[in-house]
Image (tube, rainbow, N blue to C red):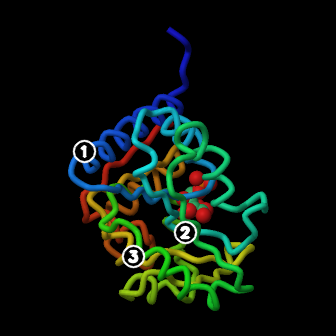
Amino acid sequence: MTNVSPREQLARQLAEAVAEALRADLEHDDHALLVVSGGSTPVPFFTALAACRLPWERVQVTLADERWVAETADDSNARLVREHLLCGPAAAATFVPLTSDHSTPEQGAEVVAERIEALAWPASVVILGMGGDGHTASLFPDSRELDLALSTDATTVAVRTPSQPQPRITLSAERLHQARRHFLHITGGDKRAVLARALAGDDVRELPIRAFLACPLATYWAP
Ligand SMILES: O=C(O)[C@H](O)[C@@H](O)[C@H](O)[C@H](O)COP(=O)(O)O
């Protein structure tokens, strides 16, 4: 038995659950939509999911949020997806990024929204991450667009926040709720403590992850 770390085991278990969900939906739908988050946590999950046997040509992939940077930039979530998930057979999936040629997310938000709205909603799966400040996607507590992102029925919202170096674009909470299944993928003691605080209170503006605690949320956590 190889010595597999708890985080690697978690990534593999999450990948199996997501693959199973996609297969179940593809039994009765032509396409299945997977919405993933960026950051660092998802990398082993992406690698494990890419190795799963799926009719990838019928899977659509998009992002919950994105930094408004070129796809060649180190901190591009689209780059992370292309490098770690869309590999091997999974390269046959249809990936729809969240950036456009516009110089700002405010200018690009509408054309990105149109592109996203054409996908196979409701999503089969939304994978959420969480930051130490309780943000998820780009719903940041210190963002002046938080109230809008939590209340609008628009698909995308341009976000600027003092805590992040780049402008961002995020799917709105309303759009992120349009899914059959929600998974929260977090690791480490700090995030476990933030989740415990989120579960103990109701103020969504304080900890925006709270916007997703009511929908069934499968939490995948490892130390
Ligand atoms: O663009 C992003 O950064 C993500 O979509 C973001 O919402 C992420 O899930 C959290 O910031 C956690 O990031 P880590 O996994 O790097 O801790």
Q: Residue 47 or 92: which is nearer the viewer? A: 92
Is 214 placed left or right of 106 in the picture? Answer: left
List the single residue furthest toward the top: 1
| Residue 132 appearing in the image | no
Q: Position of residue 212 (x, y in %)?
A: 34, 66
Q: Residue at x 30, y 63 (%)?
A: 179
**Within the displayed image, which quadrant is ligand 1 positioned in?**
bottom right
- 59 vs 11: above or below: below
Pick the residue in front: 138 or 92: 92
Q: How much space separates mark 2 and mark 3, taking CA atoms?
A: 11 Å
Separation (CA) of disc 1 from disc 2? 26 Å
Q: Is mark 2 within 8 Å of ligand 1?
A: yes
**Which residue is pictured at 58% across the width and 80% down the height?**
142
| Whole-percent x, y for residue 190 in the image | 54, 50
Left or right of 16: which side holds 111? right
Q: Position of residue 84 (x, y in %)?
A: 63, 44
The amino acid type, in three-letter code, at marker 3 is Ala
Disc 2 crowd rating (10 Å Cα; few below 14, some 14-19, many 20+) is many
Q: Is residue 189 above or below residue 9?
A: below
Which of discs 1 and 3 lies nearer the camera? The answer is 1
- Please state which amino acid type lies under the numbered disc 1: Ala
Q: Which residue is mark 2?
A: 65
Q: Residue at x 56, y 85 (%)?
A: 109
Name the one closer to the observer, 46 or 22. Answer: 22
Task: Return the residue at label 3.
Answer: 173
Q: Which mark is drawn over residue 83?
A: none
Q: Earlier in the sequence, mark 1 or mark 3?
A: 1
